[in-house]
Amino acid sequence: MKPIFSRLPSLPLRLFVLLLIAPALIIADSHFAFFAKVRGYLDTAVSPFYFLANTPKDILDSASENLTTRTALIEENRRLNELLLRQKSDLQLLGQFKQENNRLRQLLGSPLRKDEQKMVTQVLAAETDPYSNLIIIDKGTDQNVFEGQPVISDQGVVGQVIGVNKYSSRVLLICDSSHAIPIQVLRNDIRVIASGNGCNEMLELEQLPRNIDIRVGDVLVTSGLGGRFPEGYPVAIVSSVGIDRSNAYAVVKAKPTAELQRLRYLLLLWGNDAPRNTPLSPSEVEQATSERFTHNTKVISNLEEMNHSVDIQ
């Protein structure tokens, strides 16, 4: 009777046979070209498995390289944005305007302004309260931010800090209806107050005599009055000049130079004597302006004489 399963050679015997075959194949491979062709066919057949085995490693290496490159690009982009923002803010203070301010400081009775300390900050969010126009920035008391601190962009004045916590702060925009800022006309140094009407409207210059020398296209800059905003930063450009016939006042509106609806990176400014109290209200700004009205009238007349002499030259 035949067994159901045939008996295979024992394991030691098979090992012995393989050990005899292996040297024979090595010797034959070195002496006969036929085996080189066979080896080439076998390598061709097996090579896809090599690529398949290396695929996970290649994917991980590529992902790691892309992540490293992306991180480096993000950091480089952040650094270049900060550098560009600082340089643009410096360009706002034109050399000619600086020289003019140096000549006029004795007349204006204001101290020589040193270069301000600046810090880049990023907008985290915009508050959606329909009755106020606020943004949240990523700097707070840990970075020595204080209430009333001026905030600018690379295009002009944005607003001032009205609330500070450890890691963030709230900034009231100049377009808010509760905000007022003392400004001056760059062309002739006339000083006025600009009030917000909401960020969908233009800034409005308050209660001006109908014969005031302000024209469409005039650049309005911070006057430094009240010590809140440093002197000389762009605020708005006059967009329209009209007459309120019922009150005999000039109605002047101006468009902010900063794009208040598209804010991302901003600059916080520190002055050597920056006040650390609550922001000036419109009434306080008006009071400060009234106290210096007599002095400023003399200043304006002196400026007109100076401008006239420059024109003659």
Image (cartoon, rainbow, N blue to C red):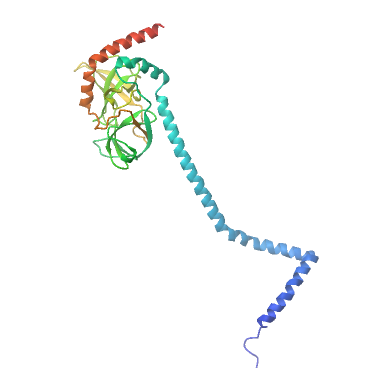
Residue situated furthest bottom in the rendering: 1
User: Taking 84 as reference, is 215 left or right?
Assistant: left
Q: Check the picture and name the quadrant holding the N terminus.
A: bottom right
* Residue 152 horizontal/vertical position (percent): 35, 30
User: Taking 27 as reference, is 182 left or right?
Assistant: left
* Residue 77 horizontal/vertical position (percent): 46, 39
Q: What's the residue at 75%, 71% (across, down)?
A: 23
Q: What's the residue at 61%, 58% (across, down)?
A: 51
Residue situated furthest left in the rendering: 246
Viewer-side residue, 1 vs 146: 146
* Residue 12 horizontal/vertical position (percent): 67, 81
Residue 72 in view, yes or no: yes
* Residue 89 horizontal/vertical position (percent): 40, 28
Viewer-side residue, 105 vs 57: 105
User: Taking 63 as reference, is 27 left or right?
Assistant: right
Q: What's the residue at 53%, 49% (across, down)?
A: 65
Asked if 256 appears above or below 79 in the picture, the reply is: above
Asked if 277 appears above or below 9 in the picture, the reply is: above
Residue situated furthest top in the rendering: 312
Asked if 44 appears above or below 209 in the picture, the reply is: below
Rendering quarter of residue 8:
bottom right
Residue situated furthest right in the rendering: 31
User: Taking 49 as reference, is 229 left or right?
Assistant: left
Rendering quarter of residue 129:
top left
Rendering quarter of residue 186:
top left
Residue 264 in view, yes or no: no
Q: What's the residue at 37%, 37% (across, down)?
A: 121
